[in-house]
Image (cartoon, grey):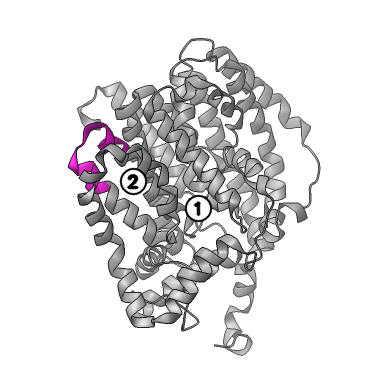
Amino acid sequence: RVFELSGRARAGWLAAAACLCFLYLFGLAGVGVIGPDEARYASIGREMAVSGDWVTPRLWGRPWFEKPALTYWMVAFGVGAGLGPELGPRLPIALLSVGFLTFYYFALRREFGRRAGLYASAILATSAGWLAFSQVAVTDLPMSACFSAAMLLALRWIDTGGRRPLVAAGALLGAAVLAKGLVPLALAAPLVWFARRRIRQAWPGAVAFLAAAAPWYALCWGRNGRAFFDEFIWRHHFERFVTDSLAHQQPFWFYAPVLAAGLFPWTPLLAHLAGRAAVKDWKRQLLAAWVVFGLVFFSAAANKLPGYLLPLLPAVCALMGIALAEGRGARWTLGASALLLAMLPAIAVVLPGALLGGLRNAQWTGAQWIWLAPAAALALAAWWLSRRPRPTTGLLLIAVFAAAGFTAVKVGASARVDEQATARPLWRAIAGRSPDVCVA
């Protein structure tokens, strides 16, 4: 379809694709694996690639049932392709994110119009939360991409009754369950309500779901027996939800600042979601229910982590994009979003310590006020360009500067992140005598 467009439109599409790929693929191997989770998942995927056992996840040769297999399979393909210990695990995740963002635009354009699709896609692609989790080999992004795609296709099925989107939605929901367990089934509860009039016609989607998810669960349970159920189903689903045994307990309001940070620099656009106009038709009501139910569900859980909120970001950004496409006074909120970009240099300073010991333990060196001047100029430009009913130019200007800013943070902070928050410098230092230092 792109090559059927006029020359100017085609050039715009190709430029957007190049920028998206650069933003998401540049510097993936710039730092070593970060934290316990990415290292653990990368190691399990590597063991799958080496052993040829694609059913039982193993860490240090022993079964590890914390998460299901989809992310491990992606890592195993990357490592098996010889891409290295950092790029191998991360590249499949980043490519999946780029593919989802492309699908996201076309799905929203079909349902809500071209401008809404463009605005929402630009916001999601340059939001800190979605971009950050697209750069690391953890399970949050694969689950969120598959679940969100399933929800958008199910919305299409509810609207038209077509079997193809239903089957695709069922298969993608199965892939989401393969990525992070049974949580996507709980998050899909609002969909059941909105599809209640078509629920008897949903059996092809159910078949597709079982075909995608059931084989691995059946094989892993059959090979490992009670240990799989006790550890994966009980401990990492029910016990994780109702007890603080995993030491991730947080207050009920924890996800309010997490959502604000995950949407950075677009957080001020949340103001457009207030009022009845934001949910005046059933499609937007479904998007809103997707967000509200997810917030309540995750807030009620005893254990809370920032990545849990990732599957809600596509719905929030879709609602933002739809509101902006309707031209509801975006000058001030877009100006505020541009002004927030002044925080990027400070984020680059804080990032290594935050990754190592959490944001509370990171060393804050103080605000870098010099960056307020260019951010204020950008905010003024966005404010002026958004004076028209459709703020396309102003929004895309902020998106371009956000992408450039995130890339600069990636370049500027990578050496310090690598030194302070990863084991790669130590590994390089002892590489010549690792058999004398490390044990099996």
Q: Is residue 117 visible?
A: no
- Which stretch appears magenta? 155-168
Percent position (x, y) of residue 266?
57, 31
Task: Report the amino acid beneath label 1.
Answer: Gln
Residue that appears at 37% across and 40% down: 193
Q: Is residue 377 left or right of residue 86?
A: right
Asked if the stretch drawn in magenta spans residue 156, the answer is yes
Quarter the N terminus occupies? top left
- Magenta segment's dominant SS is helix
Q: Is residue 338 above or below residue 264?
A: above
Nearer to us: label 2 or label 1: 2
The mark that comes first in sequence, 2 or 1, is 1
CA separation in Å, label 2 and label 1: 22 Å
User: Which residue sits furthest top?
Assistant: 388
Residue that appears at 58% across and 16% down: 331
Percent position (x, y) of residue 242?
59, 61
Asked if the stretch drawn in magenta spans residue 363, the answer is no
Q: Which residue is mark 2?
A: 150
**Mark 1 packing: few (<14 Cα in 10 Å), some, or many (20+)?**
many
User: Which residue sits furthest right?
Assistant: 366
Quarter the C terminus occupies? bottom right
Task: Report the amino acid beneath label 2.
Answer: Ala
Q: Which residue is mark 1?
A: 135
Percent position (x, y) of residue 295?
55, 44
**Mark 2 packing: few (<14 Cα in 10 Å), some, or many (20+)?**
many
- Near-viewer residue (193 or 371): 193
Residue that appears at 38% across and 77% down: 56
Percent position (x, y) of residue 241?
56, 60
